[in-house]
Image (cartoon, rainbow, N blue to C red):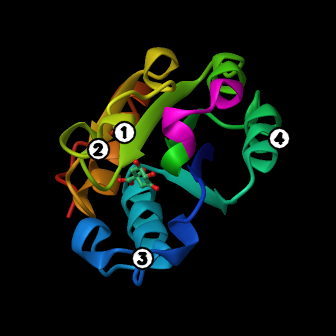
Amino acid sequence: MTKVLLLSGPNLNLLGTREPSIYGTDTLETHVERATARAALSGLALEHLQSNHEGVLIDAIHAARGEYAAIIINAGAFTHTSWALHDALNTFDGVMVEVHLSNPAARESFRHTSVLAPVVNGSIAGFGRRSYDLAVDAVVQLLDVGTGEAPK
Ligand code: DQA
């Protein structure tokens, strides 16, 4: 089965109770369950890792090389700072989609730059829980594995 790695960065383990007016009330587990189910509709096996540690995320990207067809990444605040994650993603030759629940472009200025954006296929932001649905759909399109059925 074609595998997709969903990576979640710092503080996303607190979703549900973390600034719910910005990030909503769904837990990370709920987002992952939805994304896993949606990926499965197109025959993709989605696996998830969350870490608050940059090096753990980098190690996961290295381990994904040759093993996963795609990476979906919500790097949290590392999005705006981590050239090390940028470089790690650059070593991955599969599909890469950056995802955010909120719309960083509409928030504080430090969130306006993503250092990951230049190395991924594309970025999806600002659609709340639907951001994850759209990220999976982007991977399905880019891998060309759609079933032709409308996803639920
Ligand atoms: C986030 C946006 C980032 O700016 C922030 O640091 C996060 C969450 C999002 O999903 O909207 O931790 O990636």
Q: Is residue 112 above or below residue 10?
A: above
Amino acid on which disc 1 is placed = Arg
Q: Quadrant of residue 34?
A: bottom left
Amino acid on which disc 2 is placed = Glu
Query: Which residue: 39% across, 49% down?
Result: 42
The x and y percentages for residue 20 are 30, 77
Report if residue 135 lies within the magenta region: no
Query: Which residue: 71% across, 27% down?
Result: 84
Contact check, label 1 and label 4, Cβ < 8 Å: no
Q: Is mark 2 within 8 Å of ligand 1?
A: no
Contact check, label 4 and label 2, Cβ < 8 Å: no
The x and y percentages for residue 148 are 23, 42
Q: Main secondary structure of the magenta part?
A: helix
**Residue stretch in magenta:** 78-85
Q: Nearer the viewer, residue 99 or 140?
A: 99
Distance Cα–Cα, label 1 vs label 3: 17 Å
